[in-house]
Structures are given as structure tokens and as C-alpha cells.
Amino acid sequence: MDTTKYIFVTGGVSSSLGKGIIAASLAKLLQARGYSVTIQKLDPYINIDSGMLNPYEHGECYVTEDGAETDLDLGHYERFLNITTTKANTVTTGKIYQSIIDRERRGGFSGKTVQVVPHITDEIKRRIMKLGESGEYDIVITEIGGTVGDIESLPYIETVRQLKWELGDDNALVIHLTLIPYLAAAGELKTKPTQHSVKTLMESGIKADVLVCRTEHELSEELRNKLALFCNVRLEAVIQSIDASTIYDVPNLMLQEGLDTITLKKLHLPEKHTPDLTSWNAFLKKHKNPKHSVRIGLVGKYVELMESYKSILESFVHAGAYNEIDVEVVPIHSEYLTEENLEEQLGSLDAILVAPAFGERGVAGKVLTSKYARINKVPFLGIGMGMQMAVVEFAKNKMNWDDAHSVELHPESSFPLFIVDQEKKLNIGMEDTMRLGAWETTVVKDSLLYSIYNKEDISERHRHRYEFNTAMRNAVEEAGMKISAINEKYDFIDAIEIPGHPWYLGVLFQPEYKSTVVNPHPLFIEFVKAAFKHKENK
């Protein structure tokens, strides 16, 4: 295809309507028709990225192969499309303004007054077009965060207006996602909020080409006609997005509604063939018809907002479907775990996962959990800090190193098990010591980890600063803990396990970032199997 086509997804009436899921579902359908598609997210917040955002604020921070710390929607894109995204797929207002201000300080504007229009909008435009100009994609879908009418979204909306004018209607399309609320007292769906949202969009100079309506109830033909007439869209471009039992139903629902058909028609693209969703629907069938069930505890400090662990939860969905096992994830707040309530909280579980995090809050509970799983032979997976606390627990209770800890949490420890080691090994400054994105590591043969991957050389994504102190390695291994993955180039220790335990594994990397519908992560597949085996043995 000679010209890349651009689709812009905006939202109205309310936030959290699921623009990311709609964008990913449309991309899935277009991909299943034979088009190469990618998605990017434009976030209106002034933070440079999601790395410093509290999970309570924004949910999970998702990490790409090339180390971008991004919004969790990029996780949806990768899980649905089975592709990898990059730094080019994520844009924030902070990044835009930072690049413009840096350029201005270098004299890049030749003394001109720097303004939102055209300088900020031109920079946004450049980043949108960058993916299309690579020549890799037939279609680029751009999701614009926030809601139409938000002050912070205005530069993005103005950029879309300009691009729509420059590219022409054949090459650019605007999909507006909105809410049709149901008033129980009146017993009817109301279109007025959507009409106002579309009006706000039009006041910005943009006409919605397709209207996707989130709803709890079926839209009648009469209501669709009303929306088409008063929102100035064709009847076939009024798409119902009814609440689904799982996000993985949405591509099929959008196929039934003809979202991909109307999109291709408006972009003057051939339909090619009916979307091939064979493997997708095979996954869905297994997901909805499990033969067995397990209960796996997720021990973390952000469990009040489970979106903080979105990739872990979805990895359990993928692995559960693969094994035809329904995985009930039981949230357990690590901050409130004590010796007294440990058995009550953990005793009924078939396996335990200790989640990644930063900071001291909830750490004691993670140490107690690691000990419980080790002593009681419960399948255990520690990720990131979960792995660190498993090592700390082992040193404290098996090796009698009472003072053992990570220097992040106990700087004066006599047994500093986890330290910032990257400065000297990578010759960088402290501000760059986060290990982010994909890193290669070598799996030790004759280990549980090797039996899972069935290969020595693997690549996994990381998001952490503190490394296993190699000076402590020999003592820890002599006490009975096995080092099972090492980055040999820099001597970074990436995984531990306990021989003799049915299934006890800690990984410093975060495998959940690489699990997709088509390729469930082997670590989660085997962890779910171990949980079921433990349940049967009980």
C-alpha cells in the first residue's frame, strides 16, 4: 500500500470508557484481514512518562522492549496484536514540551516566539507521522488520552484537525468513543451527553466519522437513527459497544457491528477477506470453558486497585486458557500480613505470587509470605521485589543473617543482598541505573527455570534498580538456594530457585510484559500447572 492511513480514537462524556480496548480490537480485526497495523497512545499529562506515577494514580506502568515506561494501554496493544511496541508508540505532553523547550534553548527557533500553534502542534504531528513514515505499517491507529473538552487535550485535538485537513478524508478517520447512559428512573437510554460531546468535537473543527457507543443495554434502531441524525454520522457508522464479560470478547462484538467494514470503506481500502480469528476464538473457547480451577494469591501493596497488576492478571488469563484452568486471583495486601493471620490469609491458596514494587511499605508481609511458601511447599513465584524478598527471607531464616536486606530498604545492613551495581558495571550515573526493557540472560541447565524455557538464552524485560550482590552469591548457594539465570556479560543475577521445593522461583525480570493471547508466557503456564498439581495433592 503506497499511503499509510491514519485512524484517530477520541473519547467523550466520561473517561475510562475503554478507548484502548476499542483501538486494540479494531487493530486486531484489520490485522486479521491482512493489514499491518500499529497503535500509539497520546497522553495529555505533563509527566515525561509513567515511570514516576503512583500505580494508584494511573494503574500499572507498562515497559516496552526498548525500555519505555508507558501507560497500561500499550500492554493491551501488544497482548491483542502479538506485536512489540517502542518508545515511538507513546507520547506525553511532558515529552512534547521538553523537546520544544530544549530546542528553543539551543536556538532552534531563531529567536521566534514559541507558541502552542504551530510549534507544539507541529511536534505532536511529527510524532504521529513518524510511525507511518517508517514504511512498516499500512494503518496507524492513534489513541488520544483524556476526554474531548479537557483543557490539556486541546493541542492534540487541534493537531488531529490539522492532520485530517492535510491528509484528506480518504487517508484519515476519526472514531469517537462515547457513553450512552441508562437512567433507571426513566427506564431509558439517553443520547444527549453524546450529542454534546460530538458538538464539542465539532467546535474544535473535527467531525466524527464513526461513533462507538458504550452502553449497558442494546441500542434500538430508533435510537441509532437519532444518534446518526443529530451527531451527523451515517447510520452504519453508529457502532454499539455493549458491556462484555471479558475484554477479549470485544473484537468479535466489533466484527458483528461492522466496525472494521465501515473503517475500510471510509478509508477506501479493500476488505481483502473475512477476518481470520480462528486462534483468537480457540483461546476464547478455552477461557470460557475451563475444566478445572485454582486459587492463586497475589500478594502486593497496591491490591486496592488491581489495575496496578494488569499485565500479571492478563498473563493468568492467557496461561489459564492454555491449561483449560480457571485462575481465581485472590488479592492479598502485604502491608496487613502478620504471623498471626498468615495461615488464615494464605492457607487455602493453591499457589502464591509476590508482586513487584518499589519502597518499604508492605515489605515485611512479602518476607513472611516467602517463608510460608518455602516452609509449606506451596508453589511460589516472586517477581522483581518479590524475588528480592524471597532471597532476604532465605538469608534471614535459613542462614541466620538477621540483618540481611536490600540497601534500598536497609542501607546499613551487614548483609546487603541487593545493591545498586550498574554504575560501575555499565559506567553510568546514578540517575540512569534503572535496568529497563529487554535484557538477555543465560538460564542454568539442570534447573526448574530451564525446564520451563527449554533453552539457555532468553530475553526478558526488566524494571528495577537493585541487583543481587554477587559477593553474597557463594554463601547463599551453599545454604541451598540455586542461582538459575545470569546475565554473563555484566554478571547480573536474574533468577533464583530452591531445589527440593515442588515449585519455588524468583525472577528479577517481569515476564508478564511479554505474555500475549497467541503466546502465553511459559513461566505463567507452568506456574498455573504447579498450582493445579498442588491443589490435587492437597
Image (cartoon, grey):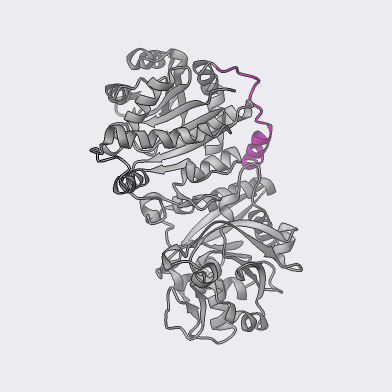
Residue lying at 53% horizontally and 15% vertically, measured from the top left = 268
Quadrant of the rendered image containing residue 373: bottom right
Quadrant of the rendered image containing residue 295: bottom right
Q: Is residue 99 visible?
A: yes
Q: Nearer the viewer, residue 424 or 64?
A: 424
Report x, y in % for residue 257: 52, 21
Residue 423 painted magenta: no
> Is residue 254 depicted above or below 404 in this figure?
above
Report x, y in % for residue 17: 40, 35
> Is residue 342 depicted above or below 79 in this figure?
below
Residue lying at 67% horizontally and 83% vertically, measured from the top left = 478
Report x, y in % for residue 440: 63, 59
Q: Nearer the viewer, residue 123 or 223?
A: 123
Residue lying at 59% horizontally and 23% vertically, measured from the top left = 1
Start and end of the magenta stretch? Answer: 269-290
Report x, y in % for residue 77: 53, 40
Q: Is residue 349 visible?
A: no
> Is residue 15 depicted above or below 395 in this figure?
above
Residue lying at 52% horizontally and 42% vertically, measured from the top left = 76
